[in-house]
Amino acid sequence: MALKVYVIDNGGQWTHREWRVLRDIGADCKMVPNTTPFEELDVDGLVLSGGAPRIGTEAMKLGKTAEYLRKADFPIMGICVGMQFMAIHFGGEAGPANVPEFGKVDLYIDEADALFKDLPKKFVAWESHNDEVKALPKDFELLAHSDNCKVQAYRHRRKPYFATQFHPEVEQTENGYEIFKNFLEVCKK
């Protein structure tokens, strides 16, 4: 039986690609609005999509995301604004990037952990962000960075919560499918 993973739609331009990649690698996947009640999330894992809202002024456009993060006992992966919201929710900081990134960047893996298991220590990733995580919350650890963004990926130390600033769902990101496959492995546990 396939793992059930929902993609929370935060209005990102590539949200449908997150759904498609997960479906292509064998997940029973569905896109749902970010206003979906937590009780309707009968899932093995959740992806918080990227989106257009600016984290400093439009976080309210992320619907029930705070409730999902507060109540979930299943794995969650935040992408772009989903990552930024997760950081703020748990006491970190996010805001305007010193150098907004758009296009290909070199991604450096600092800690392979589950998300980057068996992947190269450096590969190309696709960026599209004006905001970024400025400081990690207390219970989180850094997994990756780029030359202009010191927090490209992180994870919670105890909960199965992961996040990426870059977009693993687009074809320009090397190893994107493998990152999602690694997330599904976490969802199996």
Image (spheres, rainbow, N blue to C red):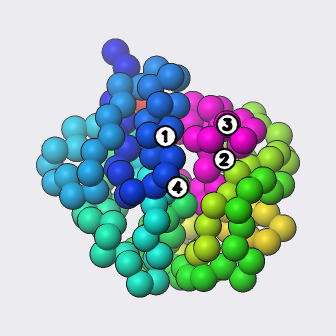
Residue at the (70%, 51%) spot, across then down: 126
Real-space CA distance between mark 1 and mark 4, rounded to the nearest whole angstrom: 10 Å
Q: Are the residues tagged 3 and 2 within 8 Å (C-beta)? A: no
Query: Which residue is the site of mark 4?
Result: 79
User: Disc 3 vs disc 4: Cβ atoms closer than 8 Å?
Assistant: no
Q: CA distance from mark 4 to mark 2?
A: 17 Å
Quarter of the N terminus within the rendering:
top left
Residue visible at 61% across and 50% down in the picture: 167
Of residues 13 and 60, the one nearer the viewer is 13
Instruction: State which tag comes first along the sequence, 3 or 2.
Output: 2
Location of residue 57 in the rendering, given as x and y in whole percent from the top left corner: 41, 84
Are circles 4 and 2 on residues that touch, CB within 8 Å? Answer: no
- The residue tagged 3 is 171
The earlier-in-sequence mark between 1 and 4 is 1
Label 2 residue SS: loop
Question: Considering only order in the chain, which callout, 2 or 4, is on the residue closer to the N terminus?
Answer: 4
Q: CA distance from mark 3 to mark 2?
A: 23 Å
Q: Which mark is residue 113?
A: 2
Residue drawn at x 59%, y 56% is 164
Amino acid at pointer 1: Glu
Is residue 55 rendered to the left or right of residue 80? left
Residue linked to disc 1: 18
Q: Is residue 174 magenta?
A: yes
Q: CA distance from mark 1 to mark 2?
A: 21 Å
Q: Secondary structure at mark 1?
A: helix
